[in-house]
């Protein structure tokens, strides 16, 4: 592979439980829902307004209201997660080695820039990435391939030469739709949930995995 594309939340950090709690607080305590953890977890993909529509139905909120609620949810997530903000084991070393070998890297995420900046700037890792594709940069969310195809375009690397790191089935499906292989970080989903996706090369708990380390010549 000539380039690496990373999803952000759940892939670079083990933070999806914090996102789930933030969504549960917003949906139940502020918006009158009664959703369980297991009902919310599989719906947390794509852009935040899309999550609101999936959970509460269309036409309930204006675009402006969904943007406001999205920001409120992310502020809640950031406040709780900040003391625990850290890359998954082995990822900092992996990024540095890839960077030293001039392997182009990108982030392809449905997160809003507010959350991407929270991670990159607090961890001082922005310089590793030649391209960053966020929710506002695409019209269609994962599992549509636009996010990853846009990242490959910005890296000037053919999609088939890009390897995606993901943590959710819809993200792995987006990689497949883009013609890309994927490595799955198992922070939030079990391998059997990806059984229909033939583009998955490896399941790993973190970036200390031997297969992942072997992707970069030492």
Image: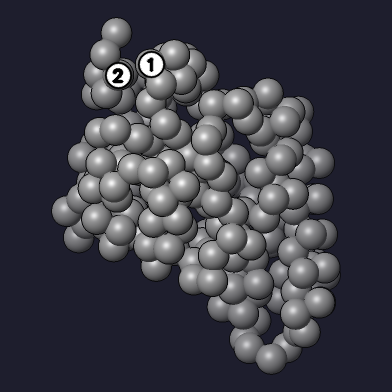
Residue drawn at (81%, 50%) of the image: 75
What SS does tag 1 mark?
A: loop
Residue 43 placement (x, y as % from top left):
51, 66
- In which quadrant will I find the N terminus? top left
Left or right placement of residue 45 versus residue 111 in this view:
left
Residue drawn at (66%, 33%) of the image: 120
Q: How many marks?
A: 2
Asked if the residue under mark 2 is in contact with the one under mark 1, i.e. CB atoms within 8 Å, the reply is: yes
Q: Give the mark nearest the N terminus, 1 or 2.
A: 1
Residue 3 lies, with reference to residue 101, above or below; the image says below
Residue drawn at (79%, 59%) of the image: 71
Residue drawn at (79%, 50%) of the image: 76
Left or right placement of residue 137 versus residue 160 in this view:
right
Residue 116 placement (x, y as % from top left):
66, 44
Given residues 19 and 130, the one toward you in this image is 130
User: Where is mark 2, residue-wise?
Assistant: 216
- Please identify the quarter of the rendering in which residue 49 is found: bottom right
- Which circle marks residue 150 in the picture? none
Given residues 38 and 22, the one toward you in this image is 22
**Marks 1/2: CA–CA distance:** 8 Å
Left or right placement of residue 55 versus residue 188 in this view:
right
Please say whether residue 206 is visible from this viewpoint.
yes
Residue 48 lies, with reference to residue 79, above or below; the image says below
* Mark 1 surroundings: few (<14), some (14-19) or many (≥20) residues within 10 A: few
Residue 209 lies, with reference to residue 4, above or below; the image says above
- Please identify the quarter of the rendering in which residue 58 is found: bottom right
Q: Residue extending furthest top?
A: 218
Please say whether residue 192 is visible from this viewpoint.
no
User: Where is mark 1, residue-wise?
Assistant: 101
């Amino acid at each position: 592979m000539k380039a690496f594309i990373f999803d952000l939340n759940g892939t670079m950090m083990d933070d999806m439980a914090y996102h789930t709690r933030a969504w549960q607080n917003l949906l139940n305590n502020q918006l009158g829902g009664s959703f369980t953890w297991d009902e919310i977890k599989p719906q947390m993909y794509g852009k935040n307004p899309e999550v609101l529509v999936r959970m509460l139905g269309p036409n309930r909120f204006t675009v402006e209201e969904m943007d406001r609620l999205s920001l409120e949810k992310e502020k809640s997530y950031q406040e709780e997660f900040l003391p625990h903000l850290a890359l998954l084991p082995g990822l900092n070393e992996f990024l540095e080695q890839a960077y030293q070998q001039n392997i182009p890297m990108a982030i392809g995420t449905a997160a809003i820039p507010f959350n991407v900046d929270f991670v990159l700037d607090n961890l001082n890792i922005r310089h590793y990435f030649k391209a960053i594709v966020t929710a506002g940069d695409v019209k269609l969310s994962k599992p549509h391939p636009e996010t990853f195809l846009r990242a490959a375009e910005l890296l000037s690397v053919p999609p088939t030469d890009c390897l995606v790191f993901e943590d959710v089935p819809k993200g792995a499906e987006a990689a497949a739709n883009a013609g890309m292989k994927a490595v799955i970080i198992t922070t939030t989903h079990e391998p059997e949930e990806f059984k229909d996706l033939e583009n998955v090369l490896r399941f790993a708990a973190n970036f200390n995995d031997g297969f992942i380390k072997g992707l970069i010549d030492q």
